[in-house]
Image: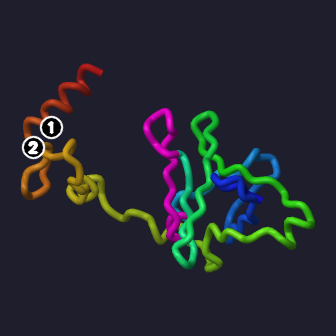
Amino acid sequence: MLTDSDGQDVLGVFNEYAYTLECKGSIYSKIQITAYSHEVDDVPMKLGGKQHIICHNHGGAQRIFPLHIENGLCYLHQRYPTVDGMNTLPQQIMTSDKVWDPSLFDTNMTLKELIKNFPVSTERDKGFYDEKGDLLLQFSEAVQKSLNEF
């Protein structure tokens, strides 16, 4: 059972998912939940993130679930439902019922290819790369200098 940001209890449906009784919650796979078209912002609020999962449901409805962070790991708080809850609560499907193959999202590129394909998407990034996507020499030298000082 999960509780959304409106205080509504729902039955969380986690297909193809790992859960252990020993955990306070479940350490989730951001990729698995995102692959089911939900938005996962697991950046801590103390670092400017939202620390939640937004579930997009049929008809445009959304549910937002807060995430708990402890010792650097994100948890989605879960608890066992009552018998009555099993029969009456709405369901929130969190992951696909298809076989989960996490290797579908593996990156099969060298580091050089990854860097070359890295998107320049923010104002902060502009000026670090030339029009071909290569790292500008002055930035490369600045990075090397800071690494040497580290």
| Residue beneath the point at 13% across and 37% down | 139
Q: Is residue 33 above or below residue 21?
A: below
Secondary structure, mark 2, is loop
What's under tag 2, amino acid-wise?
Leu
| Residue beneath the point at 54% across and 46% down | 51
Q: Which mark is residue 116?
A: none
Image-based side of 27 in relation to 150, left or right? right
Q: Is residue 52 above or below residue 73?
A: below
Q: Magenta segment, which residues?
A: 33-50
- Please identify the quadrant where the N terminus is shown: bottom right
Asked whether residue 127 is drawn in magenta, I would say no
| Residue beneath the point at 56% across and 70% down | 61
Q: Are marks 2 and 1 in contact (CB under 8 Å)?
A: yes
Secondary structure, mark 1, is helix
Q: How many discs mark residues in the rendered view?
A: 2
Image-based side of 123 in relation to 64, left or right? left
Residue 119: quarter of image: bottom left
What's under tag 1, amino acid-wise?
Ser
Q: Which residue is disc 1 drawn over? A: 140
Per the model, the C-alpha gap separating discs 2 and 1 is 6 Å
Specify few, some or many for label 1: CA neighbours under 10 Å numbering under 14, 14-19, or 20 or more.
few
**Residue 46: percent from left, percent from top:** 49, 33
**Residue 21: percent from left, percent from top:** 82, 52
Image-based side of 57 in relation to 137, left or right? right
Residue placed most toward the observer, 47 or 120:
47
Q: Which residue is disc 2 drawn over? A: 136
Colour convention of the picture: rainbow
Residue 82: quarter of image: bottom right
Residue placed most toward the observer, 109 or 62:
62
* Direction top: furthest residue: 149
**Residue 62: percent from left, percent from top:** 56, 65
Specify few, some or many for label 2: CA neighbours under 10 Å numbering under 14, 14-19, or 20 or more.
few
